[in-house]
Image (cartoon, rainbow, N blue to C red):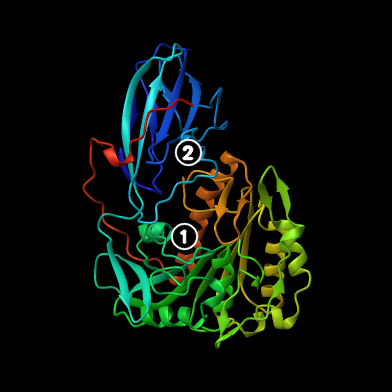
Amino acid sequence: MLHVDKVDSLLTEKLKITATGLVPFRCYKFYLKLHYHQGCFHSYCVIRSDEFGKIDLSKDKPIRGTYHDVDPMGLFISLQASQELRFGGSLRNDMAKPSFYTLRLISDSEKILDEINLKKHWFHPLVTKIEVSQDGLYGTIFKPPGDGPFPCIIDIPGANGKISNGVAAVYSLEGFLVYTLAFFDYKDLPKRCRDADVSIFSKHINFIQSLPYCSDKIGLYGMSLGGTIVNFLSTKHPELSAVCSMNGPESFYKPTALLKENGKLMECEYFDHKLSINFNGVIKQSPSFTAAFEKLKPETSIKWNQISKNISFRIISTLDDWILDGVVNGSNVRRRLINTGHHVEIDFVPGGHLIYVPYYPHSSHTYNKFDRLSLGFGGECTLHGKSQETIWENNFKFFKKVLGTPPSLPDYERDTVVVVPDSEVKRDSKL
């Protein structure tokens, strides 16, 4: 009855989901559960079978469900948290482990007719994951098979400062050499962002450049505060080729999102928390960011005119961001780069602040331990999920265009039957 072309696939691979042998012109529910040890995420759609008793998710539009248009990956882009998850909870996968799903076909009388387990890898099984811990540098390398040299992407973390392998792992799916790192609140590193010195990033860049399998084509990627940091680092490293900034604030700001430079705290504008809006305990910070960046002066701004003209930029801003005013912030960054003669492409897309990886469940808010409050991210679940899919497709195109296309990774031995590990299973739930 239920058919999936690849039960074992890479995270970015789209699946062909069909059902056959059904009663013609009858409604059936497709229910997808993403297993997670703290509580599942799930989605569903109801579709009517055709005259041959067949349903094809790449051709048939849902009558109702968590998504509404024809989309082969509609169930994946519309995953949402179940009641099992705590308030503000989200999927954490800092180790980039495979994600496990269960897909069910359910009759109009709520009887489970068939089910299939699925597995999606966050990095290719033939890619080597190398942990780095030397001379005060901590990070992870994702190295493709072969001697290289390979074009390289460095993923710069944001406000938590720690190693989070998810983004780096997914970039490695296209054959790039990828490196991610920690710069505070990790092992013996400073506990706060403001106690870290920007020189640590140059040490990491120099380290990755020294590897024999790293080419001279290097790009930076950063999200949120990481997006600000990659823009800043482009002023210090003219040898870079590409910078991709996702929802990166226009500049650093005090008292929490700044670093030291040459041992002294950066000059920054003050971020006034009192201007933020409280919606039932969830904070919308965009008014505070807008007010802070309206006061930017040359000494508190990124030195855009010091960036090499050989560096290409890609800026992504989301329209429903509760952290930043995405339109204003993205437009300002784009204008500054154009005024200084740089090549820049920009995407304005529906979604909230936390654009992570394809098919990552939407998070509307989360608790920030540094600010000690629940931060709202914004975004509507399905539109946000679709944006994650398309943004990553465009990110891959950008880095391939600027850094060069790495060799394609060979296929791997795929499982034909997937068993969900006990560690990922929590009590069953219904949508």
Viewer-proximal residue among 80 and 37? 37
Q: Which mark is on residue 85? A: 2
Name the kind of residue labelled 2 in the image: Leu
State the residue position of label 1. Answer: 396
Name the kind of residue labelled 1 in the image: Phe
Earlier sequence position, callout 2 versus callout 1: 2
Q: Quadrant of residue 338?
A: bottom right
Q: Of the residues tagged 2 and 1, which is closer to the observer?
A: 2
381 is higher (above) or lower (below) than 334: above
Q: Position of residue 257 (x, y in %)?
A: 60, 69
Residue 393 left/right relative to 293: left
Q: Position of residue 288 (x, y in %)?
A: 73, 61
Q: Quadrant of residue 118?
A: top left
Residue 177 left/right relative to 275: left
From this viewpoint, is residue 328 visible? no
Residue 113 left/right relative to 299: left
